[in-house]
Amino acid sequence: MSEQLLLEVRGLKHYFEQKRGWLARHKRVVRAVDGVDLTMQTGEVLGLVGESGCGKTTLGRCVLRLVEPTAGEVIFNGQNLLTLDATAMRRVRREMQVVFQDPLSSIDPRFSVEEAVAEPLRTHTSLSRPERRERVLTLLEDVGLGVQHLDRYPHELSGGQCQRVALARALALHPRLLVLDEPTSALDVSVQAQIINLLTELKERYRLTYLFISHDLGVVRYISDRIAVMYLGKIVEAGPARAVFESPLHPYTQALLASVPIPEPRAREWRFILEGAVPSPANPPPGCRFHTRCPSAQTTCREREPALHPVSPDRQVACHLLEKG
Amino acid sequence: MQISDVVANRSQERQPERLTHRRLHYTVHVILRDPLAFFSVSVIMVLIVLALFGPWIAPYPEQGMGRTNVPDRFAPPSAQYRLGADQLGRDVLSRIIIGSSIALQVPTIVVILAVAVGAPLGALAGYVGGWLDDLIMRLTDLFLAFPSLLLAVAIVAALGPGLTNAMLAIAISWWPWYTRLVRGVTLSLRERYFVEAARSIGVPDRTIILRHILPNCVTPILVQATVDFGTVILAEGSLAFIGLGTQPPAPDWGLMVSQGRSYILDQWWISTFPGLAIFISVLAFNLLGDTLRDILDPRQYR
Amino acid sequence: MTEPLLQIEDLHVSFFTPTGEVRAINGVSLEVYTGEFFGLVGETGCGKTVTGLAVLGLVPKPGRITRGRILWKGRDLLRLSSREMRRIRGGDIAMIFQNPVTSLNPVFTIGSQLVRVIRLHQGGSKRQAEKRACELLEAVGLPEPERLLQSYPHELSGGMLQRVMIAMALSSRPSLLIADEPTTALDVTIQAQILALLRDLQSRFGVTTLLITHDLGIIAETCNRIAVLYAGQVVEVGPTTEIFHRPCHPYTQGLIQAVPRPDQDVEYLVAIPGTVPSNPGFLSYCLFAPRCSYAWDRCWETQPVQFPVGEAHRVACFRHASPEVHP
């Protein structure tokens, strides 16, 4: 496995203001991403999981610089993206692409499949129209579609087919990193399986690296090499997928895994239900953000925020209970 | 290849018909089903025919253009003058027919102008936001603060009466509506995934607005423009009515209504029939707008 | 064998759109017994939501029930007058939907909406209704009910709102609660809370529950009997454990194999090839045949009916039509 670090994120923060109340009297700061460090090797799949408000989607957008981070560094292929100007950024965008959750609305309803997939080619290359069409056809074949889909429109396609088109478009410029933001959440189970198999196949064929953002733990376990669990803007646990799933260390990860329903009756003897709701990211609890719902919360947890620290060569947890000494 | 594959492929191909065929079929269906839609489409088709072929259809085309025929002045509706003759003996029917070309030309030009100016401004304001948005919106607020007709009157009064100036004046008072409309649509489009996807590909903002935002504004613009056709006919007619639009002897409907005012009690047909023509045309365009909205709503195709 | 509480017999529902007739439900038959937690599972477009709506007579235009009977405690609901049906709706049979935010009116307080529903079905003064509302809110696990009555929907989280909806549904002590994807819009940890609540209410108040969902995990963990829907038909019905451990219909097998599990490593996800037929109601052969790896001649001739394969376990598949199962 290549040891080259494709992506390194350091201290990433994204805060934004939200106006509340009549006539926008009160402003509050929402800390969507609050100090995240992570790394990705070429060729791996990093699964990013968490519930709503945890910041995983925002983190994905920050990595792609679709939103401007408030602080931190995003080092892609050795370059800090946040220092690049618009022209340089445009060039880098060829190497990092995104696939969104809602396949139907991720393609312009007025664009045919051919136009949609050719858009990156039009933007970055000087291929002629017939040359673009050739390339589009190859891409469509790669994702399991064919020449008959060239002049279809999104609303004439099924969800699964739309997602394939989105994938073809994302691959048009031979990117190295693909950020997949809930790519199968809007799809039916049977179609989801097809898309996941396709993703795996494409990854092998083109040596892609995936940042796979999802709330579906089953899918994440299947496709990821490593995973990172987020809660309220911070990573609380990270490590190899199987290890984290089989022996979760952070209480939130444990609760998450215990809450997910398993498609097998009576597979689980015990059921741990996590009380309470996720606090608002505009007003996170002091100390460890999870302490309000944590069954093992101690005094330290209320006072100091735990840092993400390694508990073994490849696993990290942000929890006081696991700190040595 | 198993039977299952063959059938699967076949059912796949049979599935999505071409967009145009289905839409055409649906359009015809809607028009034929709904009496109001049928009415509006028929009226507008008649208007177009009249506007194009007026000089060949009108019984007295030269009178339609303005040649007087004083001996027959005030002739009531009869076999010779179907809708009567006006105060200068001209056949009212012919004048209405010839006048239909003005009635269609004016809104066409005005709406095209208004959209050409208003829509890009709206898209810019909505997409870029920030100070540009504020600037453009304050400008539109300024224009919208005037009652539109009053503004048009003021402009024509400054420029001098006449059809061209009237069209210009109406267009100037009309563009802000499109800016507002397009800005609203742009704001909602900006959040859609395909715009984000375009940005992630590295498409420059200018191109996003031109190729993604504006084309998706076409439907709401079209619906609004259709209804505006009617309103502009009314506005232009009003300007002509007070003498600030088309000048005599042009067969402008509003002008005809105005000139027949003094005779309304005894020779009612001089004002009434042009007035009816305005009414029916405006109604037809308004109804067409509703029909268009039903036809163009892509959600019908799911 | 006791009489089922709800019995749907050969239900057919069509939508008469301007572009043609769409047959959403093509012969659904199932029974729900008192005290059960019954699950209706299937993918998008299989007709599960429409089935739930049909029971309450809420199929939206241009849809219409074209055939079949829906027997509720022995009476055919499709033969009732609209007044009688209105009394049952929200009264004896209650329903909660997927997105609680859109189910509640944002302009009125929770209290006023709850009170209105309570008084609609049970009468009584405002004070009595408020008291009952507080009891209900407590029963569904919401703290400080008196304060909640004064709150507006936008002040509560999705999970809390869904609890309010459940409280509203239970206010008339219904015999059946239909829950249409009640947790799909909620986070996983909240989902677990709501599902536990539903099971708890079922055992405490004896509310028979019909749960509609696409999530096999939810079905496996909460329901004791399930029906699998495909293209508007029931392809398999039976006890949950039976169906998961011995799935007989190829579609059920395919579904189970296509779902990646969070608790196990799965070698390879087996995807079901092909897609759902676009207008299945007009086909005369087994609706799953085009995608089925076992399909043989008989499958292309007629549609299978439900054949028994075990204890209260039925499958609509010709492979199980007779003692000699075709290999």
Image: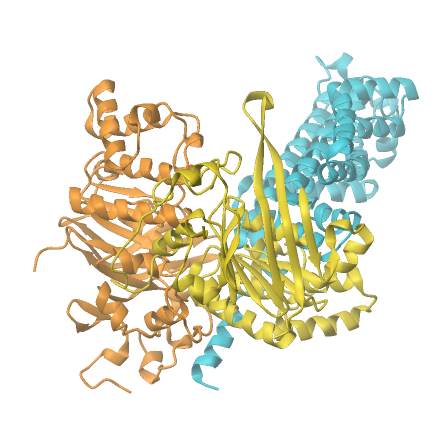
Nearer the observer, B91 or C98? C98
* Rendering quarter of residue B108: top right
Q: Is residue B81 visible?
A: no
Q: Position of residue B243 (x, y in %)?
A: 84, 18
- Residue placed furthest toward the front: A325
Nearer the observer, C239 or C267? C267
- The residue at the point 23 percent across, 66 percent down is C241
Q: Position of residue B216 (x, y in %)?
A: 68, 47
* Rendering quarter of residue C23: bottom left
Q: Is residue C148 above or below residue C272?
A: above
Q: Is residue B181 above or below residue A212?
A: above
Image quadrant where one finds the N terminus of chain A: bottom right
Nearer the observer, A24 or B21? A24
Left-right relation of A81 to B164:
left
Q: Position of residue A49 (x, y in %)?
A: 49, 55
* Rendering quarter of residue B170: top right
Q: Is residue C292 above or below residue C117?
A: below
- Residue placed furthest toward the left: C1
Left-right relation of C46 to C133:
right
* Colouring chosen for the image of the structure: by chain
- Please identify which colour was used for chain B in the image: cyan
Q: Which chain is yellow?
A: A
Please count the marks in the image.
0
- The residue at the point 30 percent across, 51 percent down is A272
Q: Is residue B105 above or below residue C280?
A: above
- The residue at the point 51 percent across, 66 percent down is A224
Q: Position of residue C196 (x, y in %)?
A: 27, 48
Q: Is residue A103 visible?
A: yes
Left-right relation of A324 to B17:
left
Q: Which chain is orange?
A: C
Left-right relation of A87 to A225:
right
